[in-house]
Amino acid sequence: MLEAIVGSLPELKALEDTVATLERKSGEAQARVQALAHKTAQAKEFDLNAEAAALNSGRKVPNASEPGLREQLEGAGRDAEVLERRLALAVGDRARFLSEHHAEILALLEAAHAEEGQRVAEAAETALQGLLRRFAAEDAARDLQRRHPAPAAENTGGPESVSVVWGALTTQNLTGGPPRGTLEGTLRQLISMGAGTVIEAGAENDDESGENAA
């Protein structure tokens, strides 16, 4: 949820951007260290084999490539360590800001929570009205079939295969999907998110304990 309020706190946004940038650079630096370590190990093997072959054949020993790569590896390793320390400092600065502005941030989060809840409630209200109209159409169609059934078609063809339906016929197994009550209850629960709620530590645990007690 911090993403929803970070725009209201320029200093926090700057800290978040710094941390994100340093995380990316640190990852890139670590990848470069690993790549150079692999190349350095390969170069060392190549240099040793080339030197041995040259000495056995009486030729001049070629210049080794491993020392140059090792120097690059050491530089890359130092750069990676510096980035790790910069990242740790930036994370600490962000944590300090969050602690010092706890009340302000909590108020912004509560406002964002209420605003998003209202949006969910409005969308759920629209969906519920459509769902109830759909239920009404289903009821009307079912009532029409019961009161005024369609005339049976004259059977002029040959015998057809028989379909067997196991179990009781219900709206759920005829149309598929969850029962009406489940759909309607879910939407009504979402609509209730439009009411003012309070974010409290342990609120979810309290709700769970109340459900278990019920």
Image (spheres, rainbow, N blue to C red):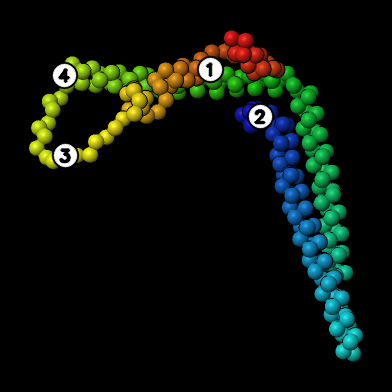
For the question of whether residue 175 can be seen, the reply is no
Q: CA distance from mark 1 to mark 3?
A: 57 Å
Query: What is the x, y in percent for residue 175?
Result: 33, 28
Residue under numbered circle 1: 193
* Left or right position of 80 against 209: right
* Three-letter code for the amino acid on which mark 4 is drawn: His
Residue 148: give its label: 4
User: Which of the numbered marks, if any, corresponds to residue 2?
Assistant: 2
Relative to residue 132, is residue 106 drawn left or right?
right
- In this rendering, the label closer to the viewer, 2 or 1: 1
Going by the numbered disc 3, the residue's amino acid type is Pro
Q: Residue at x 84, y 78 (%)?
A: 49
Helix, strand or loop status at disc 3: loop
**Residue 112 in sight from this viewpoint:** yes
Where residue 109 appears, as percent x and y from the top left, is 65, 22
> Which residue occupies the foreground of this view, 55 or 130?
55
The disc label shown at residue 159, or none: 3
Which of the two marks, 1 or 4, is nearer to us in this view?
4
Residue 73 on image: x %, y %: 84, 61
